[in-house]
Image (cartoon, grey):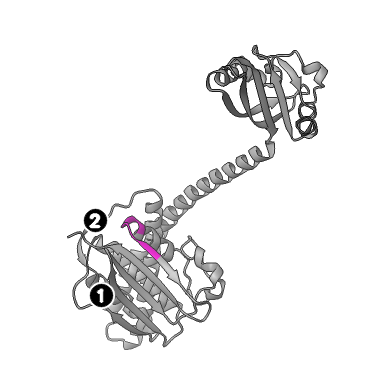
Amino acid sequence: MLLRLLVEQTMEHAILLLDVDGRIVWWSPGAEGIFGIPSSEAIGQPASLIFTPEDIERGIPEQEIAIARANDAAEDDRWLARPNGSRFWAAGVMIALRDEDGQLLGFGKILRNRTDQREHTETLRNQVEAAHSANQHKDLFLSTLSHELRNPLAPLANAVEIIRAIASSKRELEHPLKIIERQVETLRRLVDDMLDLSRIGAGKVELKKEVAAIHDLLQQALESTGPLLRERQHRVDVLLPSSPIIVEADPDRVCQVFVNLINNAAKYTPAGGRIWVKGTTEGDEVVVHVEDTGIGIPHDMLPRIFDLFTQVETSRAQSQGGLGIGLSLVKNLVTLHGGSVQVRSDGPGKGSVFSVRLPLRSA
């Protein structure tokens, strides 16, 4: 009795019983509601009654019965049809029904309308495709923009040298010339970062690995960032072990990672702040921490801080015109080396720590 009540009152599922030839011998109330076909019209019809014309032409109804006959069950998710021409996405199973001796008595088919789930899946797929397309357009935009911006950089730098040569005796020109040089260098670094991001996105970055000491790479990075550090009057403490830490990596790319992190710390730390560059080894990895007493990062931003074009709203004034691509480039370059990068911050005003992990050179 309970089983009969369950079957009669289940309206979300259609339940069909078929004979051994695949003809409908019982049609549940749920099937009447889902398909809009009364039981009196369904009984005696072949199972193909509920399939779409194209699936009938491909022999899907017979195939489903054959699979259930051979394997005892056939799971199927597909479009099914109603007499009024409408369709819905059904998730169901056909089960071979046998007696105690294994003799086939017929088939039972249970299905449910899952058009909502199908539409949700299609929406997600479309969003993924749209995101992929947007990412490709982004790479193309970055590449084009970078090349267009790079063209005037060399003439600008040359013009500064010419002006300095001509006006070498005019000391009052030295200060504005240094400003121009510094801004040209900032623009060049920004353009190079954009070009690298577009190359990484296109899979065109090849690492030129060689044996290198982390001490040397950090020293190069500090020399490159020296003008900005001095301009902002930061105190920088470098804490490294006395013995060399050796990695096998692309020196230029790893140096680029540290330059970006130190620049980031310098830009987002108020004038006169402190920055620490610490290196150590943990297991088979070298770990370099770049720590600062800067403006910090809100907790909700930490998971997204390495995403492209991400900048903390409160830090835009500090960014000095940055686009939010440096940290994304850092993550990509470190990942290419088989390493990882993490960030830690206790919140706004409490500084931040970026930690780079790279594999040590094998013995």
Q: Quick check: 351 left or right of 177? A: right
Find residue 99 and report its image quarter: top right
Tag 1 residue: 219
Q: Quick check: 138 left or right of 336? A: right
What percent of the width, then of the height, locates residue 275? 37, 81
Mark before the other along the chain sequence, 2 or 1? 2
Disc ID at residue 208:
2
What percent of the width, then of the height, locates residue 30? 77, 30
- Give, as a three-letter code, the residue at label 1: Gln
The relative height of residue 284 versus residue 133 in the rendered view (above or below) is below
Look at the image and say whether residue 49 sits in the magenta stretch. Answer: no
Q: Badge 1 local density, few (<14 within 10 Å), some, or many (20+)?
A: some
Residue found at x 80% / y 22%: 37
Picture quarter with the N terminus: top right
Look at the image and say whether residue 336 sits in the magenta stretch. Answer: yes
Number of callouts: 2
- Give, as a three-letter code, the residue at label 2: Lys
Find residue 339 and report its image quarter: bottom left
195 and 82: which one is in front?
82
Is residue 95 visible in the rendered image? The answer is yes
Q: CA distance from mark 2 to mark 1?
A: 20 Å
Q: Quick check: 334 left or right of 23? A: left
Judged from this view, the residue extending furthest toward the left is 363
Q: Secondary structure at mark 2?
A: loop
Dot 2 and dot 1 residues touching (CB under 8 Å): no
Is residue 155 visible in the rendered image? The answer is no
Find residue 164 and report its image quarter: bottom left
Residue range (magenta): 335-341
Q: Badge 2 local density, few (<14 within 10 Å), some, or many (20+)?
A: few
The relative height of residue 178 versus residue 118 in the rendered view (above or below) is below
What percent of the width, then of the height, locates residue 133? 51, 45
Judged from this view, the residue extending furthest toward the front is 100
